[in-house]
Amino acid sequence: MPVDADALAYDDRGLLPAVVQDATTKEVLMLAWVDAEAVRRTLDTGTTWFWSRSRQEYWNKGATSGNTQSVREVRYDCDQDAVLMLVDAAGPACHTGEGSCFYRTLRASTG
């Protein structure tokens, strides 16, 4: 059942995590933060919008790099405190140039 962006369970800062996933390959591309306005912008424009916690401003993925993300669907989890954005990506998701921000592997400590 669809809900309005305002009905999601934002944290005390008014934010919730947005997982971005390739709609075709299902690869997780990135994790970013959204507020109700970023969710509305995403739904209205069909491209991903996020809230930058460091710059305290909205950003439209790919607006400067050209690596845009066309949104096929936005889903929310059972607690309504996270969203999943299924996208068609035009270029790498990561600012490093990697296709996904999750390109490194963590290993256990040896000690």
Image: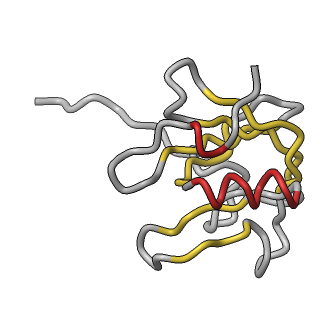
Who's the residue at 49% across and 22% down the image? 79
Count of picture labels: 0
Q: Quadrant of residue 53?
A: bottom left
- Which is more toward the observer, 12 or 65? 12
Residue 110: x and y, percent? 18, 30
- Which residue lies most toward the left here? 111
Relative placement, left or right, of 33 versus 21 is: left
Q: How is the image coloured?
A: secondary structure
Quadrant location, the C terminus: top left
Q: Quadrant of residue 21?
A: top right
With respect to residue 18, does 49 lie above or below?
Answer: below
Relative placement, left or right, of 8 versus 67 is: left
- Which is more toward the observer, 31 or 52? 52
Residue 47: x and y, percent? 83, 58
Who's the residue at 73% across and 55% down the image? 40
Q: Quadrant of residue 102?
A: top right
Relative placement, left or right, of 56 versus 34 is: left
With respect to residue 64, does 15 lie above or below?
Answer: above
Who's the residue at 68% across and 52% down the image? 39
Residue 74: x and y, percent? 76, 37
With respect to residue 108, does 100 lie above or below?
Answer: below
- Which is more toward the observer, 87 or 56? 56
Quadrant location, the N terminus: top right
Who's the residue at 77% across and 81% down the image? 64
